[in-house]
Image (cartoon, rainbow, N blue to C red):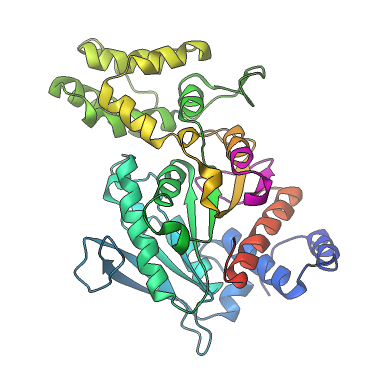
Amino acid sequence: MYLKFPAVFFALAVFVAVLPGCSPARLAEAARVLDDIDAGSGPSQLKEQTPPPRREAVSYGAYGSGNGSGAFGGDLYSSTEPGLPGLAGMVLVPGVARKGKDDPRLVAFATTLARARFMVLVPDLPRLRDLRVGPEDAIPIAAAARYLGGRQTGQGSVGMTAVSYAVGPAVLALFEPGMVEKVDFVLAIGGYYDMTAVITFITTGYYREGESRAWRYRRANDYGKWAFVRGNAGRLDSATDRALLTEMAERKLDHPETYIDDLVARLGREGKSVHALLVNGDPERVPALMAALPPPIAADITALDLVRREVASLGVHFVLVHGHDDPIIPETESMALAHALASRGSELFLLDSLNHVDPRPAGLADRLRLLRAIYTVLELRDSGAAR
């Protein structure tokens, strides 16, 4: 028996289990899943009760055909438990990280989901491994969902899970042809809605709940700012500025306190427009500074901006999870996305503390909130359709 939660956690879980409409068996399963997430590669009751899932490389075409010679590929995780196939599919979108689908934290999460009887496909997204995010990343994500939908024929629903900046391309994938018929639900952890608000936060540390509210401040993790630079440097026309901004970002991502003034001094017109946004500390100036960015960067920001999309028209159920201490994207972004989706299309779970890079809750109250979120995902798994 490996469950690590305190006894009071189980007392509260039992209390929740007897509420009308709550499945005690599903709640117990949700507790095992949460425990396994918390355990990482260590022992847990879920590991004790289920055999290790199978992980295999697959390839598929843009429209989901899996003939072994497709343009896209990824890793498929599936249950090896005899007589217990996957109840639903899950496209697990890698984050903006160099290890991509092979990041140990992502592998552990995919394995947990497979133990929970999801057939999990983690697509290989080279652009995200190179810290680049663009609207074109929606295409391989949509292809992964189509492929998984074909594998899941007659076996239930298909969901998507994405974290942080990867939530944008995952949502854009839903607007690709035929996708709303393929995907039933989305689990978005630490995601965004408004690109201007996100860029304001990563460059100045300021955020707010709606334009009529007062600004609030907390220190943003510089990773978000320099990942933005690294991902957009290649869109500049000037080869010199491309190289300088790339070198600046690489230095800062490796050593946040490193010196870059030598590179800043050599920037041309395009590079200076990007640098002006980075060093600005006034949230009111951000829209004007964004408008001065080179057109290719501005165009991609616009294309990734979910504010400009009719997300409520998708008819896909969203489970949104966000921490109040997120140093990359503020929780107000998930709140705004939930509002845009309307209450019938989303469920929002706000935690006091949740590191979106390594999403393990800290306190008891947060564990209970995350338990409810996991319970909801398992309920969607079992429903066969979430519309």
Give the residues in magenta.
338-360
Q: Is residue 255 visible?
A: no
In the rendered view, tell whether residue 112 sits above or below residue 365: below
> If the image is split into quadrants, where does the C terminus sit?
bottom right
Instruction: Tell me the quarter of the picture where residue 77 sits.
Output: bottom left
Q: Nearer the viewer, residue 132 or 61?
A: 61
Q: Position of residue 57 (x, y in %)?
A: 30, 70
Q: Position of residue 113 (x, y in %)?
A: 52, 67
In the rendered view, tell whether residue 359 sits above or below residue 258: below
Q: Residue at x 21, y 22 (%)?
A: 244
Q: Residue at x 67, y 43 (%)?
A: 350
Q: In the image, is 25 to the left or to the right of 90?
A: right
In the rendered view, tell whether residue 88 sits above or below residue 317: below
Any magenta on residue 341?
yes
Q: Residue furthest left?
A: 239
Q: Nearer the viewer, residue 374 or 168?
A: 168
Q: Position of residue 47 (x, y in %)?
A: 56, 74
Any magenta on residue 271?
no
Q: In the image, is 69 to the left or to the right of 279?
A: left
